[in-house]
Amino acid sequence: MNWQVPRMWEDGDVWIIGGGPSMTKQFDIPDQVVRDVLNGTSPASVYSPYMEGIHNKHIIGINVAYLFGDWIDMVFFGDDGFFNQHKFELATFKGLRVSCVSNVASMSWVKYLPKDGKGRGISENPKTVCWNNNSGAAAISVAANAGAKRIILIGFDMKLNEKNYQHWHNLYGKGDDVSVRRMQKLPFDRHMRGFAPIAQDAKKRGIEIINCSPDSKIVEFRKVPVKDLL
């Protein structure tokens, strides 16, 4: 269903949870709990109690971050492969389900935003979204058009961690450990292209963007640990 982003978070903070592995460190999630999620013996929802400090915030979860629990206000996804894998679970998710994947446009339970023609940055039209080459960066465009005054990024690493993991989970069905899938080209260079235009557009709008991924390759935004913001 085509959607126009309402000004529902006017002058507020919006937290966006991406997939980078540093997310678990920002919430001091024990290594054993992380290992249990990575090897599939525990669901992603076991992280939720450690993230209690943001349960009452405005939250956009990227892709599988919706699995943390009903405190996630919105799931945003731009990958039809993810949608095909999770559509039955997404159908019962109680928050907003927002996407720029064209094959969900006819579904009444998904809020559809076509990709903006300019491609990068923050869309000037609340009926569209700048894709920015990845779902996390696209969600910044959504948050801005929802009225956010400050946008806080978690798990926006744009790099592998010290154990060669790309995500805080292993839920995409192909092995997250890069040693398992050495032949797959990593997407970080492509993902990075949208952040400079986003920073420029955010400055024009008076929106502050903070990156809570301390070792992130993104250089456009101030880096602040989650603990300091809470």
Image (cartoon, rainbow, N blue to C red):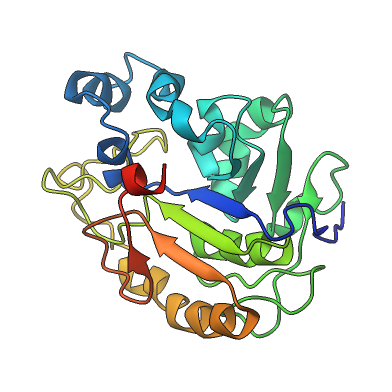
Given residues 53 and 21, the one toward you in this image is 53
Classify the position of the C terminus by image quarter: top left
Residue 54 pos. (x, y %): 50, 35
Say if residue 84 shows up in the picture. yes
Which image quadrant is residue 195 in?
bottom left
Name the residue: 38% across, 71% down. Answer: 221
Residue 144 pos. (x, y %): 65, 66
Say if residue 21 shows up in the picture. no
109 up-or-down from 119: above or below: above
Residue 170 pos. (x, y %): 34, 34
Which image quadrant is residue 59 in?
top right
120 up-or-down from 65: above or below: below
Given residues 95 and 144, the one toward you in this image is 144
> Viewed as shown, does residue 208 lie left or right of 117?
left
117 up-or-down from 55: above or below: below
Residue 226 pos. (x, y %): 35, 45
Residue, far top = 41
> Viewed as shown, does residue 121 lie left or right of 177?
right
